[in-house]
Amino acid sequence: MKILMFAHDGSLNRGCEAIVRSSASLLKDKIKESKVYLASGRPETDKVIPLLDGIYDGSSMPIHRFSFDWFISSLRVKLFRDESYALGRIHQNIIKHIDDVDVCMSIGGDNYCYGEQPGWYEIDRRVKAKGKKLVLWGCSIGEEDMSEQKLADLRTFDLILTRETLTYEMLKGKGLQNIKLVADPAFTMEKEELALPKGWQQGNTIGINYSPLVWKKNPESKTAVIRLIQHIIDTTDMTIALTPHVIDQGNNDYAILKELFETFRHTGRVILLPDDLTATQYKGYIARMRFFIGARTHATIAAYSNCVPTMVLGYSVKSKGIAKDLFGEVKLVLDIKELSDSKKLLGAFRELVSEEESIRNRLRNVLPSIQTKSRQAAQYIKELV
């Protein structure tokens, strides 16, 4: 079986790397002699991922003004309001590989959370036109993200694998039948443990991940996070490890965390992890933390999957859904609007600390079943084909 993963924009987002890395491992483990290929918006960033049988340039191709494609595209849009030719040319780097594979797997996870995606819709249409199997792998979608156009696209999938209950229930409520509930593949990803940096306290280091995405959605949240760090320094003896997880230009955790590091450098209690680690290496550090507070979903999954008590600075349905499946409730997930409220942030931190052992025990108990759900996703692919 040949499987093509697409809707991936490169591995400078270590969460995207974690999805590809763990998915390839799960698929190859469950489906013997399978071949797994990746179409990537930035293939040079994905060379750190083993097990892939090929990495293709899946980047978008511009349509240059006054070119043949431009004239045809303009004519079809003007006369028929039809963008399919233009979208087909733009995404030709992905579309040209459809003939060579058995399954096309859209792996973006939360790609459908960010407005309409006509490019993905066109790729999906062409996959089905060629008689290939189409799978949405490990997705999260909020009720607020849905539209008639998006729902029509989702109906074309042979299989939709949702990574948490809230998305599963919402899509079921929309009348979709081609859905299975699984868990994020990254719950099964391995870790690589590098040497601990100077100042790290074994068993007494708390990780903090804060992102430009959260800051842009709620600018006042940065002040609240600064107050939280000061509170941790004033009231505990823990070391704080600032932990980037997306190192992409314009969306770089490291840049904003470096500002926080400089603010507290004089305390000698704050460490800034480097910006050039792989997803497995970040997971290796997170696994050895006492607590973790994170904005990036796959940084928190790295913590959860190592039974590290975690507080989530959430901004979408995925954070709430994953927490609900772990704890039976949306536990220690602060909504984006709450992040500027220092009282709520400090209150959640106190809850995290006071319930440390019960949270750790809950994660130990539930993690095997969550990882089984992650592995079940590959079984569903095997049954589909």
Image: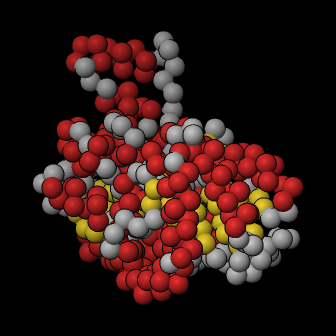
Q: Mark yes or no: residue 358 visible.
A: yes
Q: Residue at x 62, y 51 (%)?
A: 225
Q: Nearer the viewer, residue 277 or 264?
A: 264
* Quadrant occupied by the C terminus: bottom left
Q: Mark yes or no: residue 298 visible.
A: no
Where residue 281 sits: x, y (%)?
68, 69
Query: Is 261 left or right of 152, judged from the image as shown?
Result: right
Query: Is 16 left or right of 92, judged from the image as shown?
Result: right
Q: Residue at x 33, y 69 (%)?
A: 329
Q: Nearer the viewer, residue 205 or 383?
A: 205
Q: Residue at x 67, y 50 (%)?
A: 226
Q: Residue at x 57, y 74 (%)?
A: 353
Query: Is 131 left or right of 377, judged from the image as shown?
Result: left
Where residue 120 sits: x, y (%)?
36, 42
Eyeballing the image, is 219 above or below 138? above
Where residue 185 sits: x, y (%)?
45, 70
Q: Nearer the viewer, residue 162 or 325?
A: 325
* Quadrant occupied by the N terminus: bottom left
